Each structure stands twice: as C-alpha cells, then as structure tokens.
Image (cartoon, rainbow, N blue to C red):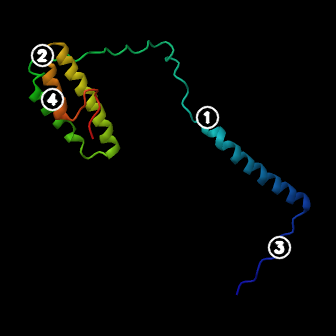
C-alpha cells in the first residue's frame, strides 16, 4: 500500500501569492466573457452608408379578365388554394384562410367594378365560398 504524501510546506507569502494569481486568472476569465462576446461582432460595413437604398417595390393591382371572373373559376380556385398547406399547423391554416378570404373578397369586388360579374352572381359566389357580404367567413 502506498504511503500518503506529506503536506508541502509553503510560506504564508507564497500562499497569498498563489491565491492572488488564481483570483486574478478567475477574474480575467469572468470579465473576458462579456467583452470577448462583444468583440466577436463583425465590424460595421463602411460601404453601407454609401450604398443607395433598394428601390421601393411596385404595387400592382389585380386586373381580372373575363375568364378569371367566371364564378366557376373563382370558386374552383378558392377551394383548391389551401390544399397544398394541409400539413401546416391549425394556427397557420387559420391565418391562410383569412388571407384567402381577403383576396377572394378583393377579387370579387374588382370583378364587379370591371363589370365582369354581377352583384347577384357575387352574392351567390360569396355564399358558396362561405363568405358574408361584409367579408367575414362563416364558421
């Protein structure tokens, strides 16, 4: 069986020096974390101020034609649009349904404005889509 080592004899001054060095190293490690993380950021791009802003996107209005405004085509598109998103969570599907409803109401209104859909056809179409006259979807 091995004999235990005898304790090292260290003077008080050496102990204070070792403790001070250990404390200094710990302090450096603690302080280096936040400053090191801050210095890890990429420097700002000097060219950013000289680059022109990107051009504004053009807003385009949907301009339907006679074939687009056919009630059968609008209804078919309305029923088939969300099938590709069937795997999405319910919250995403609800948001997509609201967006689809808003787009359908806008399309119907634009078709009426252009004289390509009568108000009676629009009412019938909206009812078959489950949309009220005020643009809200029926549950």
Q: Is residue 46 left or right of residue 3?
A: left
- Mark 1 or 2: in front is 2
Q: Cα distance, mark 4 to mark 1?
A: 61 Å
Residue receiving disc 1? 39
- Residue shown at 13% from the left, 21% from the top: 69
In the rendered image, the vertical position of residue 127 relative to residue 117, given as above or below? below
Q: Disc number at residue 125?
A: 4
- Residue shown at 19% from the left, 41% from the top: 83
Q: Earlier in the sequence, mark 1 or mark 2?
A: 1
In the rendered image, the vertical position of residue 91 relative to residue 77, given as above or below? below
Residue receiving disc 3? 7
- Mark 4 or 3: in front is 4
SS for dot 2: loop
Q: Disc number at residue 116?
A: 2
Q: Residues within 10 Å of mark 3 (few under 14, many from 20)?
A: few
Q: Residues within 10 Å of mark 4 (few under 14, many from 20)?
A: some
Q: How many badges with numbers are in the image?
A: 4
Q: Cα distance, mark 2 to mark 4?
A: 13 Å
Q: Earlier in the sequence, mark 4 or mark 3?
A: 3
Q: Position of residue 71 (x, y in %)?
A: 11, 26
Q: Quadrant of the N terminus?
A: bottom right
Q: Residues within 10 Å of mark 2 (few under 14, many from 20)?
A: some
Q: Residue furthest bottom?
A: 1
SS for dot 4: helix
């Amino acid at each position: 069986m091995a004999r235990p080592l005898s304790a090292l004899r260290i003077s008080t001054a050496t102990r204070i020096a070792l403790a001070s060095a250990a404390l200094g190293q710990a302090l450096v490690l603690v302080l280096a974390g936040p400053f090191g993380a801050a210095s890890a950021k990429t420097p700002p791009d000097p060219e950013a101020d000289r680059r022109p802003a990107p051009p504004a996107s053009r807003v385009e209005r949907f301009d339907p034609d006679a074939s687009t405004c056919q009630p059968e085509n609008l209804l078919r598109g309305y029923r088939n649009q969300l099938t590709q998103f069937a795997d999405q969570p319910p919250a995403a599907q609800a948001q997509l349904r609201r967006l689809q409803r808003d787009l359908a109401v806008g399309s119907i209104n634009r078709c009426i404005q252009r004289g390509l859909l009568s108000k009676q056809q629009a009412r019938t179409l909206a009812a078959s889509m489950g949309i009220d006259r005020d643009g809200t979807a029926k549950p």
